[in-house]
Structure formats: structure tokens, C-alpha cells
């Protein structure tokens, strides 16, 4: 499959699609799903302490029979059970049944205790000791990266972040900052608009592109992320979907290979216009979500005010001269709240 590798700032290379174990739970089902992912062609497994399925992933890795060099393994320091980084990486290696991981991440900046510079020095020791080929971070914002880079001897190789069309607007400065500092971006939850927020503005352009290219909508979103130059972390319990995710690597790779071909109209290519259309739809959805949040908070505040006035009136805490006025105010507030909620129902 034409999903390729991305060269990291430490000279190593990382496959630009990974199978994530976040939602798998634990037990035999988790082992079976990782085994299935490896069997269909995934060669990058992404797990973490806090997922509590490193051991199950390790069983699948061992049972795959693959040479260690043929499989890229990422795990994360999640501060599980209050353990430090040195203890945690050794526990993770034991759970996974390997001598090293390819990429070790601090799962969140709040886990960098007592502070980011100190925690990063421990990560640098993990790399120096050969327990991880590359080290990086997850969910770090620009301010966090600035603190880290100010004292780091080893740059983080990657920053794994939430990325899908409804958040790409706010994440773009972070992505650009990472690229400017030669830090790779890994993207999780790319398929959120289809799996958890269907019916939004992104559905339209994604479905139109999918129809034109004769592919699945989820393949379009994965190709969109690939076009952003990021490493995709995704998951599914269904074999056919995993196969489709890998096949999404075919989208958008032919334009530069066949630049002089006369048959480009027959090539399934995600164009810059397609990417922009998805971005723009995502921006519309983000504004709607922000407006929805503001309106809901206003509605809740209005209801709280109405309830407080009502209780005060009932308990006799307010002068009688205000009761009629308050009653009228309550009616007005209730009317406003009703129409706000109605607008939310109709518009969103």
C-alpha cells in the first residue's frame, strides 16, 4: 500500500499510518484486534500505559511472527499508578515483550512532573539507554513545546494531537509551529466528523469527493489528513474497514507521479481544492459548535436566574412590590429560553 514513511528529526523513519489500541479495552478481544490489524498490513501499532492493553498488544506482536525491525511500536508514558518515567518505560517493555519501542511519548503535558524540563530529561535518558529509538510528546500546545525546547538536548521527534476538520482551524498554528521546528505531527480521531458528529457541514464535501473518486467517505478523510503531512493514528474492529483505511493511501498520490499523463481525469486524486473545501466546511462546523455552546450556556444561565427568582419569591425573600415585576421577568426569561432552545433544535 502507498502509505509511506516519514523521516523524523533524529534520522529514524515512522510509518505514516498506525493502528491505535485506545478504544479496544483489554482481554482476548484486544489481542485479536491487534492481530487482525497486523494481518491486514498495519506495521505501526500505537498504544499507551493508560489504555491498559499493552500486554494484549504484546501477545499479538509476538504471535505475528514478524521480525522486530518489521514492526513500529509506539507507546506512551501516562503516569499510571503514579510511577515515574524510568519505571514506566520498563513496565511497558515487559508488557509488550520487546527490548525497545520505536517511539515513546509523554501522553499529556500535565503528566510532565514536576515540570516539563525535568520530565524531558528523563525521556532523554530513556533514549540514551536504548529503551526507545525516538522520544516525543502528545497533546502539547505551543507554549508547552516552547518550554521543552528551551532546555532540551534532544528535540521531540513527534507531537501526537487531536486533528479532524472541525478542529483543524485551531490546530493549524500548532501544526505549523511543529513543522517549523522539524517536529512530526501524529493525528488521532481524524474520523470524528463521520463517526461521532455525523450530519455536520463536513459531510457534504466529503461525500461529494467520495462519489467522484469512487471511494468511502472515511477514506477521503484519511487522505485529507495525509495531505496535511501528518501521521494518522486510527482504529476499527472491522477487518474490511481496516483494509479500506490502508487502501486510502492510494488516494492523492498519483498527481505528482503522473504529472505529464494525458489521463489525469481517470486518476483518483485529492486536489488542493478538495482539501480546502473540507477545511472550509470544518470551519463552518467549528463556528456552529462555538455558537451552540454559547447559546446553551446562555440558556442555562437564564434558567438558573429564573429558578433563583422563583425560589426567592416563594420564600418571601423579596419585597412584595417586586413580585409582579419578577413574575413578568420570569415569564419573559422562560419565553426567551424556549425560543433559544427551539432555535438550537431547528438550526443544529
Image (cartoon, rainbow, N blue to C red):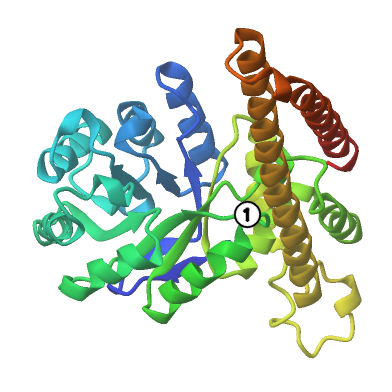
Q: How many marks?
A: 1
Q: Answer above or below: position of 270 versus 189.
A: below
Q: Is residue 181 visible?
A: yes
State the image quarter where residue 303 is shown.
top right
Residue at horizontal 42 percent and vertical 44 percent from the top = 45
Most foreground residue, 283 or 298: 298
Q: Answer above or below: position of 266 versus 90.
A: below
The image quadrant where one finds the C terminus is top right
Residue 48, given in percent of the width and then of the height, sits at 34, 39
Residue 310, given in percent of the width and then of the height, sits at 68, 17
Residue 331, given in percent of the width and then of the height, sits at 83, 25
Q: Answer above or below: position of 186 versus 92.
A: below
Q: Answer above or below: position of 341 versus 321.
A: below
The image quadrant where one finds the N terminus is bottom right
Left or right for 207, reference 56: right
Q: Is residue 1 visible?
A: no
Left or right for 62, reference 81: right
| Crowd rating for badge 1 (residues with CA inside 10 Å; few <14, some 14–19, many 20+) | many
Q: Residue furthest top?
A: 315
> In this figure, which residue is indicated by the disc labeled 1?
164
Asked which secondary structure carries label 1, the reply is loop
State the image quarter where residue 261 is shown.
bottom right
Most foreground residue, 77 or 259: 77
Residue at horizontal 12 percent and vertical 55 percent from the top = 122
Left or right for 36, reference 8: right
Residue 270, given in percent of the width and then of the height, sits at 77, 69
Residue at horizontal 61 percent and vertical 22 percent from the top = 308
State the image quarter where residue 121 is shown.
bottom left
Left or right for 229, reference 284: left
Amino acid at each position: 500500500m502507498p502509505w509511506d514513511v516519514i523521516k523524523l528529526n533524529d534520522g529514524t523513519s515512522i510509518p505514516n499510518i498506525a493502528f491505535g489500541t485506545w478504544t479496544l479495552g483489554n482481554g482476548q478481544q484486544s489481542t485479536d484486534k491487534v492481530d487482525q490489524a497486523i494481518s491486514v498490513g498495519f506495521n505501526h501499532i500505537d498504544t499507551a500505559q493508560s489504555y491498559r492493553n499493552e500486554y494484549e498488544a504484546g501477545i499479538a506482536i509476538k504471535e505475528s511472527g514478524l521480525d522486530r525491525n518489521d514492526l513500529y511500536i509506539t507507546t506512551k508514558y501516562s503516569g499510571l499508578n503514579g510511577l515515574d518515567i524510568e519505571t514506566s518505560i520498563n513496565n511497558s517493555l515487559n508488557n509488550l515483550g520487546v527490548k525497545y519501542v520505536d517511539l515513546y511519548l509523554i501522553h499529556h503535558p500535565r503528566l510532565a512532573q514536576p515540570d516539563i524540563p525535568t520530565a524531558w530529561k528523563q525521556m532523554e535518558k530513556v533514549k540514551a539507554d536504548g529503551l526507545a529509538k525516538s522520544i516525543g510528546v502528545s497533546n502539547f500546545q505551543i507554549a508547552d513545546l516552547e518550554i521543552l525546547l528551551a532546555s532540551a538536548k534532544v528535540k521531540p521527534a513527534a507531537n501526537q494531537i487531536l486533528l479532524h476538520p472541525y478542529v483543524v482551524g485551531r490546530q493549524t498554528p500548532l501544526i505549523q509551529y511543529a513543522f517549523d521546528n522539524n517536529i512530526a505531527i501524529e493525528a488521532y480521531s481524524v474520523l470524528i466528523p463521520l463517526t461521532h458528529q455525523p450530519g455536520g457541514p463536513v459531510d457534504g464535501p466529503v461525500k461529494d469527493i467520495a462519489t467522484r473518486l469512487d471511494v468511502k467517505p472515511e477514506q477521503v478523510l484519511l487522505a485529507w489528513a495525509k495531505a496535511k503531512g501528518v501521521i494518522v493514528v486510527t482504529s476499527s474492529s472491522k477487518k474490511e474497514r481496516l483494509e479500506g483505511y490502508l487502501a486510502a493511501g492510494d488516494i492523492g498520490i498519483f498527481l505528482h507521479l503522473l504529472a505529464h499523463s494525458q489521463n489525469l481525469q481517470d486518476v483518483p486524486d485529492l486536489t488542493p481544492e478538495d482539501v480546502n473545501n473540507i477545511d472550509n466546511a470544518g470551519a463552518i462546523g467549528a463556528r456552529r459548535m462555538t455558537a451552540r455552546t454559547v447559546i446553551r450556556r446562555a440558556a442555562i444561565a437564564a434558567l438558573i436566574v429564573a429558578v433563583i427568582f422563583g425560589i426567592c419569591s416563594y420564600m418571601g425573600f423579596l419585597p412584595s412590590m417586586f413580585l409582579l415585576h419578577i413574575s413578568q421577568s420570569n415569564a419573559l426569561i422562560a419565553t426567551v429560553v424556549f425560543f433559544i432552545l427551539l432555535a438550537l433544535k431547528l438550526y443544529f
